[in-house]
């Protein structure tokens, strides 16, 4: 049955391998049989200070990578969050239905805020999950493919939607479900496999635009352990487990199958095999990315996407306004 599928990425940095495995590469598979909305969460990128030119370039790059990963603008709606003012409007309205208690529990906020001086934590960083709920609810999305770290935000969105529907005794909002891959939903940093790979703090991690020689070098020097056994054991062997995850995801095989391939192999041989598959994936992706950039198609895609998205988003805002008693004609 056709469903509404929606996801987004915030342009806070250059896309990294975790974004690709946990999110990006999963989007295109939905577009033939579903109504797909994929956007750039550019307003979310303002939650921490960012240079305007960097934000601009990151935004263009993510659109190019969406297309490079096979998203077809004739099938999926690809747009910028800031091009559809309904996101901000519904975000403002929904803020009144979210409780401070539940916002205080948001792990990502706590993590990001803990790295800042108390006096410089922006309000936007705190209210960000409410805007994310608006992103989802505007399009009546049922399926939200994301990496592990976004699960809590989609759950908050579910709670807000249920609370709202209950308050007004009607099914105003569709209740969304996060879809999280069993493997690869949390790719860890190569230099510190106890921390998530992240584009705003890549710690020498693999960026999708990295030079392939540098990628190989980063993988060959990835932190592992003192044993010499390629075995999945997240607790005791986080580095090797992370590399096994990357390998199995990119090869489309299970972790067990990957483990079998490397029985008796030393870490050097294993890392070389991981580097080969990562480089092959990135080489293809970068070639497609370059084609997209050269084609000059981005502005046209975004304009068409914003028009399609606005139509649906505006209908939702209108419906919400009516339900809550805001005077609309
Ligand atoms: P930031 O560093 O700014 O928080 P990020 O790299 O964590 O950014 P997001 O924009 O927050 O990336 O996430 C985009 C998508 O990629 C989300 O669905 C998120 O869950 C997924 N994702 C991010 N990092 C990883 C990772 N290390 N492994 C798997 N999925 C990831
Ligand atoms: N918060 C997400 C980006 C994002 C998103 C969304 C994902 C913003 N709005 C709606 C799925 C659905 C992140 O990448 N950190």
Image (cartoon, grey):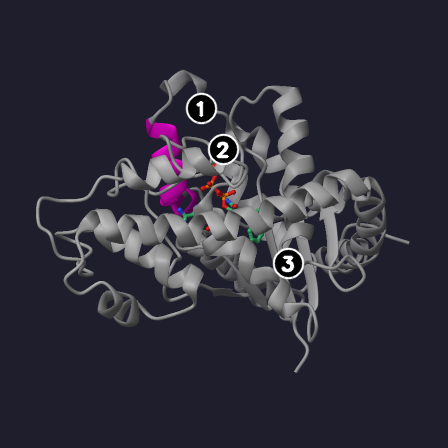
Residue labelled with disc 3 = 137
Q: Which residue is label 1 attached to?
A: 121
> x and y percent of residue 141 in the render?
63, 64
Q: Main secondary structure of the magenta part?
A: helix
- Identify the element where label 3 is drawn: helix
Q: Is residue 231 above or below residue 113?
A: below
Residue at point 52% right, 47% down? 282
Stretch in magenta: 101-114
- On screen, residue 94 versus residue 241, left or right, reads right
Q: Quadrant of the C terminus?
A: bottom right
Q: Is residue 10 left or right of residue 93?
A: left
Q: Is residue 89 visible?
A: no
**Alpha carbon of mark 3 to alpha carbon of mark 1: how far?**
27 Å
Task: Looking at the image, tell me whether mark 2 or mark 3 is earlier in sequence order.
Answer: 2
Closest to the observer, 186 or 134: 186
Question: How far, Cα to Cα, is label 2 from label 3?
Answer: 20 Å
Q: Secondary structure at mark 2?
A: helix
């Amino acid at each position: 049955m056709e469903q509404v599928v929606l996801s987004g990425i915030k342009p806070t940095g250059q896309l990294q391998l975790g974004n690709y495995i946990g999110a990006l590469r999963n989007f295109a598979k939905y577009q033939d049989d579903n109504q797909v909305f994929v956007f750039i969460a550019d307003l979310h990128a303002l939650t921490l200070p960012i240079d305007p030119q960097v934000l601009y370039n990151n935004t263009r790059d993510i659109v190019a990578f969406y297309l490079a990963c096979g998203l077809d603008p004739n099938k999926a709606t690809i747009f910028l969050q800031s091009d559809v003012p309904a996101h901000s409007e519904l975000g403002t309205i929904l803020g009144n239905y979210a409780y401070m208690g539940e916002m205080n529990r948001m792990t990502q906020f706590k993590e990001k805020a803990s790295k800042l001086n108390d006096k410089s934590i922006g309000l936007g960083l705190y209210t960000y999950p409410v805007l994310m709920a608006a992103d989802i609810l505007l399009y009546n999305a049922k399926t939200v493919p994301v990496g592990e770290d976004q699960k809590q935000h989609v759950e908050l969105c579910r709670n807000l939607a249920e609370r709202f529907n209950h308050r007004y005794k009607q099914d105003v909002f569709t209740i969304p479900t996060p879809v999280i891959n069993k493997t690869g939903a949390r790719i860890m940093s190569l230099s510190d496999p106890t921390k998530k790979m992240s584009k705003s703090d890549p710690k020498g991690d693999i960026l999708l635009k990295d030079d392939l020689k540098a990628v190989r070098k980063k993988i060959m020097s990835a932190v592992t352990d003192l044993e010499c056994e390629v075995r999945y054991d997240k607790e005791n062997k986080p580095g090797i487990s992370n590399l096994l995850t990357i390998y199995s995801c990119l090869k489309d095989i299970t972790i067990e199958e990957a483990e079998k391939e490397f029985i008796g192999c030393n870490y050097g041989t294993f890392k070389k095999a991981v580097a080969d598959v990562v480089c092959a994936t990135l080489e293809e992706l970068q070639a497609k990315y370059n084609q997209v950039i050269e084609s000059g198609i981005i502005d046209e895609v975004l304009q068409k996407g914003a028009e399609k998205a606005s139509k649906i988003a505006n209908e939702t805002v209108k419906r919400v306004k009516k339900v809550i008693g805001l005077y609309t004609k």
